[in-house]
Amino acid sequence: MSMKISKQVVISFILLVIIASLYRIMPGRPFGFAPQLAMAIFGGAIIKDKKFAFLLPLLSMFISDALYEILYRNGVGNMPGFYSGQIVNYVLFTLMAVFGFIITKLNFTRIFIAALGAPTTYFLLSNFLVWMGGGGLQRPKTFSGLLMCYADGLPFYLWSVAATLIFSAILFGAYYLFTKNSYSPVEKRLA
C-alpha cells in the first residue's frame, strides 16, 4: 500500500537535515556533540518507510562532511570532510536507526534507553574498528591497546551521549507537541 507523503513532511525532513548538517560544522562545539545519532533514533522510531529512516542521518552526515571539505580546501577549516575509511563511519551512523525501531511505543523510558544505547554501541564499534585498523593513535593490538583506544575516545563518547539525550528530547518532544492534538502518535507516524 503506497501512501502519499505530504509537502509538510518533505519540507520538515529537508529542514531537519540542513539544520543538523550546519550545526555539525559549527566551530567551537565539542567533538561528538551533534544531532545525527538522535536523528537516527528519531527516524527509526517515527518514519514508517525504513529506507528514509536510514537516509535521515546519512544525508545529514554527508552534507556536513561536504561542507567540512569545502572549508578545508579553501583554507578556512583545519579538518577535511572526506577521509580514508569514512564509509565505515557512515554505515555505523546509519545502523543506529535500528535503535529507533525498538521504540514500538513512544514513551520516555524507551526513548531514553535508545538515546543511551545508540552512542554506546557506536562508541564501542567505532573505537574497536579504529583499533583493529591501526587508525587513531595506532594503539598496540593487545587487550591493553584496545582499552587505550577506548580511553582515547572517551571524551567524544561523553559528548555524544549528552548530545543524543538532548537532541532526542528536542526531536521527540517537538513531535509530541506537533501530534498531541491530532491522532495518536502511532497513527501519525510519517509515511
Image (cartoon, rainbow, N blue to C red):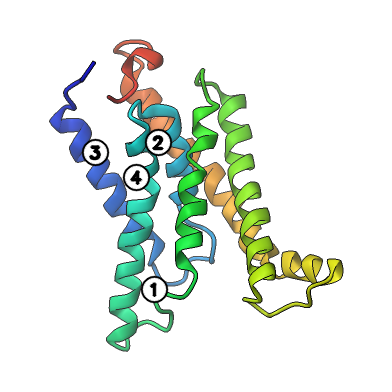
Mark 2 and mark 1: span between their CA atoms?
24 Å
Tell me the quarter of the picture where residue 113 sits. top right
- Residue 102: x percent and y percent? 55, 27
The reply to whether the C-beta atoms of the residues labelled 2 and 3 are less than 8 Å apart is: no
- Residue at figure coordinates x 51%, y 17% from the top left: 105
Q: Which residue is mark 1?
A: 82
Q: Which residue is mark 4?
A: 55
Label 1: state its secondary structure.
loop
- Residue at figure coordinates x 26%, y 40% from the top left: 13
**Most foreground residue, 122 or 172:** 122
- Residue at figure coordinates x 64%, y 63% from the top left: 129
- Residue 28: x percent and y percent? 46, 71
- Residue at figure coordinates x 63%, y 76% from the top left: 136
Label 2: state its secondary structure.
helix
The reply to whether the C-beta atoms of the residues labelled 4 and 2 are less than 8 Å apart is: yes
Mark 3 and mark 4: span between their CA atoms?
14 Å
The reply to whether the C-beta atoms of the residues labelled 3 and 4 are less than 8 Å apart is: no
- The residue under label 4 is which amino acid type? Leu
Mark 3 and mark 1: span between their CA atoms?
27 Å
- The residue under label 1 is which amino acid type? Phe
What crowding class fits label 4: few (fewer than 14 Cα within 10 Å), some (14-19), or many (20 or more)? Answer: some
Q: Which residue is mark 3?
A: 12
Mark 2 and mark 3: span between their CA atoms?
12 Å
- Residue 178: x percent and y percent? 31, 24
The answer to whether 6 is drawn above or below residue 94 in the figure is above
What crowding class fits label 3: few (fewer than 14 Cα within 10 Å), some (14-19), or many (20 or more)? Answer: few
Mark 2 or 1, nearer chain start: 2
Residue 43 is marked as 2
